[in-house]
Amino acid sequence: MNRIGQKLLLLPILVLVLFSCKDDEDITFDPPVVSTFEMGEGSTHSTEPVAYRGKDIHMEASILAYANVESIKVSIHAHDLEVGEGEVKWDFEEVYTDAKYLVKNPDFHEHIDIPATAPAGEYHVELVITDAAGNVTEEEGHLEIRKLIHVSGFEMDAEVVRGEDFHVEFFIGAANGIHTITVDIHAHGLTAGAGEIVWEMEEEFEEGYHELSEVEFHEHIDVPDNVTAGEYHVMFIIEDEDGNEEEFDTHIDVLNE
């Protein structure tokens, strides 16, 4: 047999030896990579990291994994949030091992229920991906959990001259939509002088607000010119379409001039 024939016979053997050696070597994989990670209000699939207690969180992540994913863990917790009356501290942790995630490049998509009693505030979110090679990748984010009716940016005049009007504005976020906004004004311990009245007012505002889930309440409220001067209690009651209410109050001084 000539040399060329001998070499051709040896080639398959060399290939087998090389592959056997490779199988004996440790194969390393890079850790998984999270290319996108988003969360928000579940019913709208919002990407703004805000959700409402009593509803759910939509959470999504695109994962690039060089070895099959073995598990995906989600944990949600808060730090130093005050637990109010009727509220219960909430922490969440779950490990997902569904078959649809145990592949190389899964798209993670889950909806997580938020208890109606969870304290409102900022929560820390961790996504931990472990692959079959033992690599672990962690991704972090923050989520604001709000009450079903959320009020922010409140501004109102501190005093007003009787016979004029005062300005009030604030932003409302209502997960179930706004039904009505009621303004209740009354006083305690004031005595009306001659020709005066102790001012009492209760008015519902619907136009421009009804059924909206996000809106700025902006009104100018007239003060009768014959009211007794003094401090008045101003209460705001926001009711959503499911009958939930949020109340808050402040005071205003009515001046003679």
Image (cartoon, rainbow, N blue to C red):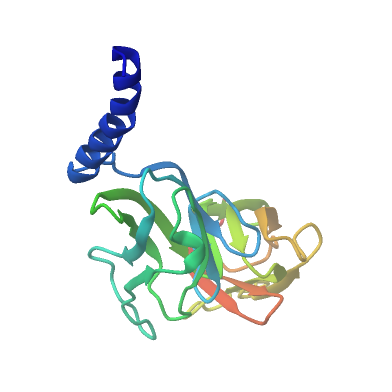
List the single residue furthest toward the front.
1
Residue 242: x and y, percent?
A: 68, 80
**Figure quadrant of residue 80:** bottom left
In depth, the one of 110 and 40 nearer the eye is 110
**Which residue does the image show at 38% across and 56% down from the upper left?**
69
Nearer to me, 207 or 72: 72
* 217 relative to 74 in the view: left or right: right
Q: Residue at x 34, y 75 (%)?
A: 90
Q: Position of residue 171 (x, y in %)?
A: 58, 53
Q: Is residue 43 above or below residue 113?
A: above
Residue 55 on image: x %, y %: 55, 73
- Residue 151 to residue 13: above or below: below
Residue 253 in view, yes or no? no
Q: Residue at x 53, y 56 (%)?
A: 40
Percent x, y of residue 139: 33, 48
Q: Decide which of 23, 5 is in the foreground and name it.
A: 5
Q: Among all residues in the image, which is located at the extreme right?
A: 207
Q: Residue at x 75, y 60 (%)?
A: 209
| Above or below 44: residue 203 | below
Residue 23 found in image quarter = top left
Judged left or right of residue 74, residue 257 is right
Number of numbered discs: 0
Observer-nearest of 115 and 64: 64
